[in-house]
Image (cartoon, grey):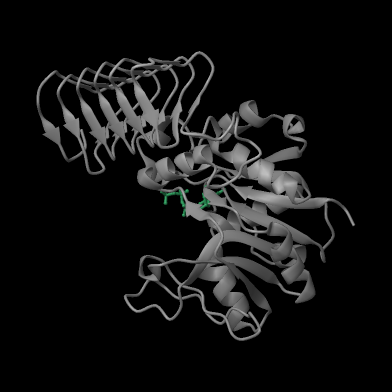
Amino acid sequence: MPALEAILLVGGQGTRLRPLTLGTPKPLLPTAGVPFLAHQLARARSYGVRRIVFATSYKASMFEPVFGDGSAFGLTLDYMTEETPLGTGGAIRNAAEALTCAPGDPVLILNGDILSGHDIGAQIRTHQRGSAAVTLHLTEVDDPSRFGCVPTDDEGRVTAFLEKTPNPVTNRINAGCYVFTRSVIDSIPQGEVVSVERQTFPGLIEAGEPVLGYADRTYWLDVGTPAAFVQGSRDLVLGRLESPALPGPTGEYLALDGARVSPEAKVHGGSTVGARAVVEAGASVTGSVLSDDCVIHAGATITDSVVGRGARVCAGAVVCDAVVGDGAVVGAGNELQAGVRVWPGIELPECAVRYSSDV
Ligand code: GTP
């Protein structure tokens, strides 16, 4: 059997993560010290994947300079770009042109914005044992009303794909990792906009094809929002999710090359301090992502937030549950809270203003 092949969906615009995704696509955002995708590549490889096709669209040209031919990751990488975005199904169909496996072989498909600790090998075995068309990873969440849910029958067959509802029939949701039988990918119409969630999966179920669920409750996170992105980075640094790609030991914080953290600063809670970033005396940084070359001045407090490349947070400012865009400056005394985003390059003058909407 040829080595397992995978398709990684990385063409989305990442609108919920703006302004972080204005200059960098979501899958390339530095997460626990490396591009987000590095964690997924390392995990896929640990389950026997040797060849991955990137399905790119938004900022497509930025991927190859980072990952090249994949040899640095022990992988062979290919890049298939959609001129206009084709949606998840159309992207999978387009990328499949670069696959080399046979029609009956399994192909792993990964959304490029998921951190998951699930056993990919067990998901593939479920697929093969059940001779399935598609096997979906399903994760169990405490509040399924925020997602569409995916009920299964006693044999693990998916019975429906249900839209968001206040009274979901199950707490199992689509976790964004699929095993497809190659021939099923080839039956998706070529060059058309297709959604696997809204069209392909419901269509297969309707046609009576075997669509299986592989359900578990291991670590799972969709890093699509700023709060979730910060949480993912924090969990990797703290070791709540093991990643072979983490560029240092797990612990209270990860400092990249040239980072300078004053012995009188407090940095903890799984924070990352980017390359050449500075944290001055008396500053406090908790569970946050500090990007390369940013400066946190004396006495500033950063909690559960992202501070962009080259940004500055001045003395005594408070940044909580917020995003400070690349090159932005938060003047002394200001307070950012509750999901506020400061756009790249904006300078908030020194002033005691409490911001609770975007600037
Ligand atoms: P939001 O705009 O914030 O919703 O994020 P997104 O653009 O990433 O969309 P979503 O989270 O729904 O996408 C799920 C996965 O599919 C992500 O890994 C996206 O990169 C990917 N994706 C979504 N649409 C497309 C597409 O048209 N083409 C390709 N190649 N990938 C896509």
Percent x, y for residue 242? 60, 45
Residue at 39% in and 77% down = 168
Q: How many marks?
A: 0
Residue at 68% in and 80% down = 209
Q: Nearer the viewer, residue 206 or 307?
A: 307
Quarter occupied by residue 316: top left
Q: Tell me the quadrant of the picture where the N terminus can be found.
A: bottom right
Q: Is residue 357 above or below residue 279?
A: below
Q: Nearer the viewer, residue 233 or 88?
A: 233
Residue at 17% in and 19% down = 332
Percent x, y for residue 4? 79, 53
Quarter occupied by residue 298: top left
Q: Tell me the quadrant of the picture where the C terminus can be found.
A: top left
Q: Is residue 332 above or below residue 358?
A: above
Q: Is residue 46 above or below residue 172?
A: above
Quarter occupied by residue 356: top left
Name the outermost residue toward the front: 264
Residue 191 can be seen, yes or no: no
Percent x, y for residue 131? 77, 75
Percent x, y for residue 245? 63, 36
Name the outermost residue toward the left: 352
Residue at 59% in and 45% down = 82
